[in-house]
Image (tube, rainbow, N blue to C red):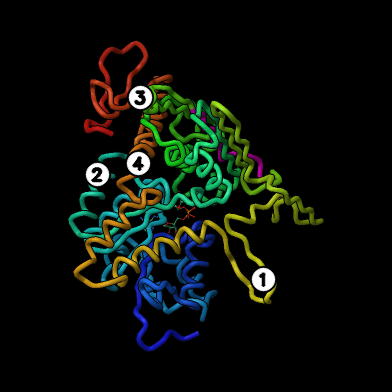
Amino acid sequence: MSPQADCSTIKAGMVGMGMIFDETYCPFFERAHQEGLFDRRFGEVSVELAAVATRTGSRAEKYKAAAGEKIADFHSYAGEDAVGKMLEAGLDFACVATPDDRHFSAAKAILESGTHVIIEKPSVLKLQELDELVALAKEKNVLAKVVYHKLLDPDHKKLRTLYHDQVLQHVNNGYCTLLEPKSISGSQFAEWIKERNPGTYVACHYIKLIDFTFPGKLKTLTASGQRGLVGPEDGNTWDSTQLRMIYEYDSGREAAFDIHTSWVTPDNFPGYVEQEVQFRFDNGLWNGHSRKRGVECTVEDKTPITMKNSINNHYNGSFLEPWGERSQRGYGIEVIERFAREVAYVELGGSAADRAQRLEEMRGLHYNELAADRQTVATVQALEAILERAAAGEPDCIVRVNDPNGGLVLYRPGVAEPEVLYEGTV
Ligand SMILES: NC(=O)c1ccc[n+]([C@@H]2O[C@H](COP(=O)([O-])OP(=O)(O)OC[C@H]3O[C@@H](n4cnc5c(N)ncnc54)[C@H](O)[C@@H]3O)[C@@H](O)[C@H]2O)c1
C-alpha cells in the first residue's frame, strides 16, 4: 500500500544485523514499510529503514537481496566508521543490536548526532556509560531507550498487574532460569564470546523483570559460575552463571532473587530456550514456564533439531493468518513498534512548541527509559566484576549498593580495602 501524499516519513537506522535483527527488527521494519504507522495523535506515518551499519556488511547485503520489495532500498555501511556514515543519512531514530560490549560506542555516536536511540538489552555494561548516554540524550533533546521485551510478555504483564493491585502482596524471594543452547555460544556468537558470560546476555531479562515488577532498592549482589566448555576452565569466558540479588522495600523487609543462566544446554533440547520463574509472596505463589505454555509438537526428521517440540508462539511466531496473510508477530516485535510510536509522537504528535513536553512524557515511560535502567546496569556491572575477580583467582566477592564507601562497592574475602566500581548513588 503506498502512503498518502501528505504522510510524514520517519527514517530509521540499524547497527548490527544478527540474530535479533532477524527475529524482531526485520519483521517490524517490513510491516512498517508495508503498512506505515497510524495513531490519532500523529496521523499516518511512513517508517523506513534508511541506512544500516554492520561489521562486515555481508549480512546486510544478504538481507537486502532476500527481502526485495519487502523493504525500502537502504544504504549499507561496514567497517570502522560505519555508524558515522549511517548517521549521514539524516535519521530520526537508530537501533543498536551489536554484541553487548559494543552498545555504548554506537549509542554515543547516535545520540551525539541528535538522533533518538533504542538499544538492545543489556543497555550498557557500566553505570558510568549509562550516565554519559543519559546526559547526552538530555543535552540533545532526544530519547534514549532500551529493549526488554519480556516486560511485554502477557504472562509477565499479568504478574505485574496482580502485584501492583496488591492481589499478590510483598514478594519474599524467587528464582528464574534462562538456558540457551550450545549453538549460541558455539557458533552464533563465536566471533564475540571471548571473556563474555551468559548472565550479562540473558539474566538481564529477569533482572529487569524483577526490578520493574517489584520496585524496591537494590542492596547486595553475589555470583558464581562454571567454565571449561566455551573457553578454558581457568579463563574469563563462562558456560553458566548463578546470580543472587537482594532488594529492600519501603517497609524495611528484604527479598532475594536467584537467576541461573547457561549457553551450553544441548542442542537437542526440546525447546529453543528453557525459561522458568517462581516468585513467592506473603499471600501467594507464581509459577511461570515460558516454554511449556501448552504446545508440544513432534515432526519426524525435524524435532528437536531444526524445529523444536515446545514453541513460544507469544514472543515471535510466524503464522498463516486466518485471513490468508503470512505474518510474523509477537511481543518481541511489539516492543520495537512501541518505540517507533514514541518517536513519532515526540516529533509529529502536536506543535513544535510542545515538543519538549511530549519528550518528557515519553521519558516518563520507565519500562524502556535508559535513565530508569540504573539498577539493572548496576547488577550487570557487579556480575561482570565478580566474575572477573573469580577468573583472576578470587572467588566469592560481594558487591554492596549505596553503602558508606560508594554506590557500587566490591568486597573481596579477607581483604579490608574495598574496590569502588561506581562512586555516585545507584
Ligand atoms: N531481546 C532479546 O531477547 C535478544 C536476543 C538476542 C540478542 N539480543 C541482543 O542483541 C544484541 C545482538 O545480539 P545478536 O544475537 O543479534 O548477535 P549476533 O552476533 O547474531 O549479531 C551481531 C551483529 O552486530 C554486528 N556488529 C558487531 N560488531 C559491530 C560493530 N562494532 N559495529 C557495527 N556492527 C557490529 C555484526 O555484524 C552482526 O550483524 C546483543 O546485545 C544481545 O544481547 C537480544
Q: Which circle's residue, 4 or 1, is located before the other in the chain? A: 4
Instruction: Report the disc number at residue 321.
Output: 1
- Ligand 1 neighbours mark 3 (CB distance < 8 Å): no
CA gap, disc 4 and disc 1: 40 Å
- The image quadrant in which ligand 1 is located: bottom left
In three-dimensional space, the C-alpha distance between marks 2 and 3, rounded to whole angstroms, equals: 20 Å
Magenta stretch containing residue 259, yes or no? yes
Quadrant of the rendering where the C terminus is positioned: top left
272 relative to 71 in the view: left or right: right
Q: Main secondary structure of the magenta part?
A: strand
**Residue 284: percent from left, percent from top:** 59, 30
**Image side of residue 171 versus residue 406, left or right:** right
Tell me how far mark 1 sits from mark 3, CA to CA. 50 Å
Q: Are marks 2 and 4 in contact (CB under 8 Å)?
A: no
Q: CA distance from mark 2 to mark 4?
A: 11 Å
Would you call the spot at circle 2 few (<14 residues within 10 Å), some (14-19), or many (20 or more)?
some
- For badge 1, the amino acid type reads Glu
Amino acid type at circle 2 is: Asp
Residue at numbered disc 3: 399
For label 2, the residue is 131
How many neighbours does mark 4 have within 10 angstroms: few (below 14), some (14-19), or many (20 or more)?
A: many
Q: Position of residue 289 (x, y in %)?
A: 64, 41
Which residue carries the number 4 mark?
125
**In this rendering, the label closer to the viewer, 1 or 3:** 1
Query: Vertically, is 205 above or below 145?
Result: above
Q: Are marks 2 and 3 in contact (CB under 8 Å)?
A: no
